[in-house]
Amino acid sequence: MEIDLLPNYQSIIDDLNSKNRIKHLLFGNGFSISYDPAIFSYNALSNFIETVDDDLLKQLFRNLNTKNFELIMQQLDNFIEIAKIFSEDDKLVKKIEAASEKLKTSLIDAVQQLHPDHVFTIPENESNACFQFLKEFIEKGGQVFSTNYDLLPYWVLMRNDANLSTDGFGKDLENSSDEYEHDPQYSELRWGKYKETQNIFYLHGSLLIFDTGADVVKEIYGGENFLIENIKARMAKKEYPIFVTAGNANEKLTHISHSKYLTYCYDSLSSIKGSLITFGFNFGPYDTHIISAINKAARNGNRGAPEEKLVSIYIGVYSDNDLNYINQLIADKKFKCKVTPYDARTVNIWGR
């Protein structure tokens, strides 16, 4: 296999460390699938939705013959535009739009229903192994970017060393500090207070994060409830977390641009310097907005000063097919910096 000839993960880490090169991490669904494919794969999510008592969603999956949510959403969006042109029936357009919204809502419902119940579901040795993986980046000044919705990285970081990572959220004092007769009253965890030191970024949102209109807030443990229970309680009240569930890259970027939190995360990826390592992220046709952010980072600063821009990206691949796909992107000059594929099978995130 060609993939067997690729560098392994640790050799890349050692090489970048020997150069004192700042390194960042971008991970996608492969990160969560490596923990439990029965929960976090598209197959698991679509199988869950197909059990929901909704004939319209069942028919969508059956007729379009795919479990790829992004493809279904993109096709629905295409149907909407075609219907607007060729049909005078407003009810048809509204029906397709309702189907699209129902699918997006069902995806969020599926993620939270299938999600592990609490942080201690992850065995301690696996949590620590994952922390060591993430720590390699954030301890040395790098940033971590996730396109996943789940709580796994948050749980791992909070359980092992909450002070090492910053997601930009913090509590504000709600009453005056000189009101000694009162106990201090604090707000929810609002985003923005610590954004200047933020090193954890959820590019497509997360189960954790809600937009209240005035603020972007992070759900927390409260009372006797685990975090996921509080999230489910919010969703039962039709409050949904920030999720980028659009079909194609342009629609994702439009969604991102309408959220101050997501825009900040995307702009942060667009301005990284040094090197980027990816894991479990396939740079598919629905991810071109991520490639655009990477290319913007590669064009930053003086081309003769590597410390002022992104100079290289290392892309993890699992198979020869993955490798051939990435090599085609390289041949087509999709990336504006040096690209090196590596063997993602050599990354043991969970210490198994």
Image (cartoon, helix red, strand yellow):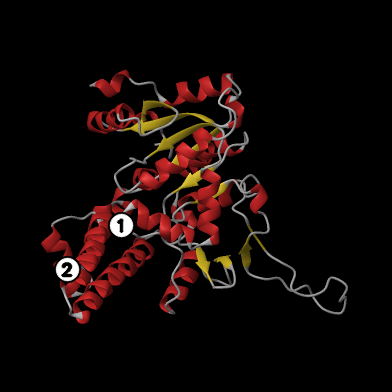
Residue type, mark 2 in image: Lys
Q: Is residue 168 visible?
A: yes
Other residues around mark 2 within 10 Å, as few (<14) / some (14–19) / many (≥20): some
Q: Quadrant of residue 85?
A: bottom left
Q: Which is nearer the eye, 205 or 307?
A: 307
Relative image position of residue 14 (x, y in whole percent): 52, 21
Which mark sits nearer the N-terminus, 2 or 1?
A: 2
Q: Are marks 2 and 1 in contact (CB under 8 Å)?
A: no
In the image, 109: left or right of 73?
A: right
Q: Residue at x 21, y 55 (%)?
A: 67
Q: Amino acid at mark 1?
A: Gly
Residue for badge 1: 247
Look at the image and tell me in which quarter the C terminus lies. Answer: top left
The residue positioned 58% from the left and 30% from the top of the image is 22
How far across and how far down the image is residue 28, in percent?
39, 45
Residue drawn at point x = 64 percent, y = 53 percent: 195
| Residue 96 x/y as whole percent | 22, 72
Residue 199: name its quadrant.
top right
The answer to whether residue 238 is above or below residue 25 is: below
Give the residue drawn at x 42%, y 61%: 243
Q: Secondary structure at mark 2?
A: helix
Q: In the shown orientation, is residue 315 left or right of residue 170?
A: left
| Residue 265, disc | none
Q: Secondary structure at mark 1?
A: loop
Label 2 and label 1: CA atoms lie apart by 19 Å
Label 2 or label 1, whichever lies nearer to me, is 1
Q: Residue 205, image x and y in percent?
A: 46, 58
Q: Is residue 94 above or below residue 316?
A: below
**Quadrant where the N terminus is found in the figure:** top left
Please give the count of numbered marks on the rendered protein.
2
In terms of depth relative to the viewer, which is nearer, 312 or 3? 312
Q: Which residue is mark 2?
A: 58
